[in-house]
Image: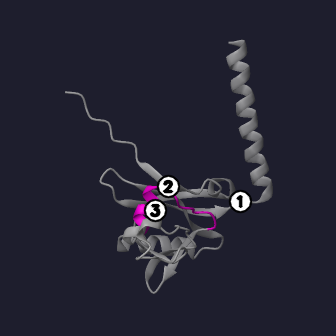
Amino acid sequence: MAKKKAPPRKIAAQNRKARHDYTIEDNLETGLVLTGPEVKSLREGKGSLVDAWAGERDGELWMFNCYIPKYAPAKNFPHEERRPRKLLVHKREFDRLIGAIQREGVTLVPLSIYFNDRGIAKVDLGVATGKKKYDKRQAEKQRDWDRQKARLLRDHG
């Protein structure tokens, strides 16, 4: 009997600029505490992680500045669009993340919000260091060269 493929996870919001602005050292999947209308809004793909970041508050991990717009049919249950949202991690992971962000220049950046195969909202959190301008230029130069090399190999066999 053939193995079943895992269904592709449905990405609700993605921070594409994060990989350009930061060097991602480590990834971690965390849970996310949401209200009902927020889940509905994310399922429609209406969410933004631009300028979002994660940090510690009162001994817990929170995501700040994540934009989830109001869900129109749920006008009786409005939510604040940029409210801090609690992230769910194990205690050992929390201690490791807090130890990492206490180093200079390290931050927690939400890379994407997606729904797993059980339909539960998850956040892909990256432990990141900021890139300098010359690092960004070097990465762009490398990407251009790789594209050009692929074209040359394709055209000239």
Disc 1 residue type (three-letter): Lys
Can residue 117 be seen here?
Answer: yes
Where in the figure is residue 138, as x and y percent of width and height? 77, 47
- Secondary structure category for the residue under label 1: loop
Q: Residue 45 carries which label?
A: 2
Residue of label 3: 41
Q: How far apart are marks 1 and 2 (CA)?
A: 29 Å
Q: Label 1 near label 3: C-beta < 8 Å? A: no
Can residue 29 be seen here?
Answer: no
Mark in front: 3 vs 1:
3
Disc 2 residue type (three-letter): Gly
Question: Which residue is at a point 75% across and 53% down the rendered structure image?
Answer: 135
Q: Within the image, what quadrant is residue 78 found in?
A: bottom left
Left or right of 142, for residue 5: left
Instruction: Specify start and end residues of the magenta stretch as a single range.
Output: 38-51
Q: In which quadrant of the rendered image does the C terminus lie?
A: top right
Residue of label 1: 131
Nearest to N terminus: mark 1 or mark 2:
2
Callout 3 crowding tier (Cα within 10 Å): few <14, some 14–19, many ≥20? some
- Secondary structure category for the residue under label 3: helix
